[in-house]
Amino acid sequence: MLRRLAIFTHQVLTNSNSILPTTTKHNSTFFLCSHFNPSCHRGNGFASIRLLSYSPMNRRIPDPEDPSNLIKEDGVSVLSQMWIENFREPDRIVTNLSSYLRRFELWVLAYQKVCADEMGAYMPRSEIQRSALEDLLALRNAVLDSRFRWGARLEFFIKSPKDKTEYESLSKRKIKAILTTTQPAPFQDKLVQEVLLMILEPIYEGRFSQKSFAFRPGRNAHTVLRVIRRSFAGYLWYIKGDLSTILDGMKVGLVINALIRDVRDKKIIDLVKAALVTPVVTSKDDGVEKKKKKRKYQKKRVLAEDEPKPDPYWLETFFGFAPEEAEKLPSWGHCGILSPLLANVCLDELDRWMEGKIKDFYHPSKSDVIWNSPEGEAEHGNTSWPEFVPTSGPDKTRKMDYIRYGGHILIGVRGPRSDAATLRKQLIEFVDQKYMLKLDNESLPIEHITKGIMFLDHVLCRRVVYPTLRYTATGGKIISEKGVGTLLSVTASLKQCIKQFRKLSFLKGDRDPDPQPCFRMFHATQAHTNAQMNKFLSTMVEWYRFADNRKKIVNFCSYILRGSLAKLYAAKYKLRSRAKVYKIGSRNLSRPLKEKKGQSPEYHNLLRMGLAESIDGLQYTRMSLVPETDYSPFPSNWRPDHEKALLEYISLDDPKTIEEQRRCIMDQGLVSPQDYVSMLVWNYKRNAGTLDQLSLVNSGSTNIERDKLLLLGSNEDKLEHRTKEEEENDKQFCVSQM
């Protein structure tokens, strides 16, 4: 391109007669003079180049109606800034959220996330068509202008990319069916829900109590079990509460009142209120058990290219193992994925009330070796270690702790049972007043630790240990004695595991469970069936990661699945018994099974020639193969990784933190005064520009004023004569120190 432009310019300069633009009455004299005057050739050539270079033909005019012009910034960066702002000032009342609702970047990001759920694959921003962006902009404008209606069935601002239905050409019968039967949430509703979640989640995540763990990013059931093992050792009485009826729905006024405590934006509140008030159309026969029809043979349906694959069998089976506390997911009106956040917003009042009760209840005792200060766990020992003092008595520490997972709560009380009964009475009154939920003593039972407390399919119990205590007596003599201590044990419930397997039809019986054949995998190959069960076993190993009896419970799961597959293969290959299956296929079912005569072919030769599929044997068939329990230490002030990163970024962005680091470096003598002066010079020039500006920017800081006077007295004359090499060296030095 540059070569062609140079040749063209040379031709114009050497022969201006070759370019004669169309003349008019006003410019004909100029072009005639330049044509006959040789001294005007150079000027005429440059004028022609300037004319051509600024012609509209070479300039690309942006389309003002293109919605992509509204995307000024990446949506992830906008979202990150929202998280940083809300974690920097978590207690402020938010008033202006409509500005974020106008940000088109958030709508595009929500479109990408919802499309990933709908299509099963992530859609880059470059692949979003212009028509989709225009529809997305129309939806945003409708939300801002209060023209958007939740639960629309026929009129949409934007449709799913895989929705090819032409609603204008539908018959009356189909339209009636759409309007009167249960339908999945519209695509545009999911988009608005996602945008609202992006805006509200950063606000409340910085305010939520550290005692709640369900429906929150970075927290799960494993976090609850680790917190229980870390903080609930030594408690005698436990109160288990089931408030899951709140997750079924609350009065709209209670939800809105909980929201406006922190959010005072009318547009956001009106959107959430409309989603809660708008009725959800459901079929009349929903909830009525239909007669089971005889299943007919169906051909395998081929999935479309843009259709997501269904969950594999092993994942569906694992979802069936969900504990009682994690089974219920709130779904309020048209709020969709916003419902869990709203449930946590409402229950956060309960968390704050319980935190106040924990502080009021605490009474330390000097004779206690573990608890004698509210924050003294790190200084006075780990509470998960054995306790070598009596766990009750009037002269012992009184302490209480609380944890909430969804609509289920667990309270541990160290003290007399009367204290637990008083707390239960106060809790019943608070729930009745705040949530209009009637509870009684049966719904909030008080249980002793010796009976075993069931929570998240794990049993909390007290285990007595007899460790050897060694200490130095007077005179330097080492004495060894047998001690008696109590230790909190968190074990997986074998009874619950059997119950879940029975629910999934993997076994029958309670005391002597008998595996049942898994006919769901009857038409699958042996290699595929074994692979599915191995994935399921791997997830079970991870689920029971923090259970004290991890080896035992996982080995039991492996026994049930191995027996179920053995019965399946016996029926499929007509081998009559499990013993024959194990004899041919080995203990872990890794050898191929043949239908006739019960003999295995030369499997290694077939596998080497590529005529046979490799079969992986079942894992964890022996207890020694199961990994050990994870006893890694869990800090008392634990936070998820994303919150740690946010708080660290906010701390490093604070000028006070940077100044403290510099002072610490100077006090430790890691930087000489001369180098420190150079560092200050470079930093002042970068941030304030000049020393005069510095006095205005940093007025009121004694340390900075002292450094400024030092610079003015010793290095003011050198600032103007510094070479580029010296400035570069100072810059590199400061970067290395920072």
Image: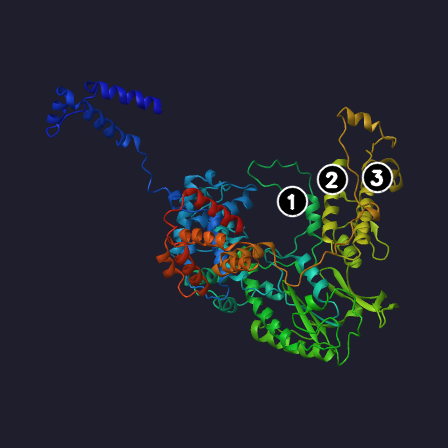
Secondary structure of the residue carrying tag 3 is helix
CA separation in Å, label 3 and label 1: 27 Å
Say which residue appears at 27% left-offset and 20% top-offset: 10
Label 3 sits on residue: 570
Give the left or right position of residue 395, taking residue 13 as reference: right
Viewer-nearest of discs 3 and 1: 1
Give the amino acid type for the residue marked by disc 2 in the picture. Answer: Ala
Q: Earlier in the sequence, mark 1 or mark 2?
A: 1
Total numbered labels: 3
Other-residue count near label 1 (Cα within 10 Å), few / some / many at <14 / 14–19 / ≥20:
few
Determine if residue 459 is in view: yes
Q: Position of residue 553 (x, y in %)?
A: 80, 53
Please tell me which residue lies in front, 701 or 548.
Answer: 701
Other-residue count near label 3 (Cα within 10 Å), few / some / many at <14 / 14–19 / ≥20:
many
Residue 311, above or below 52? below
Please tell me which residue lies in front, 541 or 477.
Answer: 477
Label 2 sits on residue: 531
Other-residue count near label 2 (Cα within 10 Å), few / some / many at <14 / 14–19 / ≥20:
some
Label 1 sits on residue: 311
Q: Which mark is residue 197?
A: none
Residue 66, above or below 649? above
Q: Position of residue 625 (x, y in %)?
A: 81, 46
Q: Quadrant of residue 521?
A: top right
Secondary structure of the residue carrying tag 2 is helix
Determine if residue 279 is in view: no
Say which residue appears at 55% left-offset and 53% top-offset: 182
Give the amino acid type for the residue marked by disc 3 in the picture. Answer: Ala
Q: Quadrant of residue 327?
A: bottom right
CA separation in Å, label 1 and label 2: 15 Å
Q: Earlier in the sequence, mark 3 or mark 1?
A: 1
Q: Quadrant of residue 95?
A: bottom left
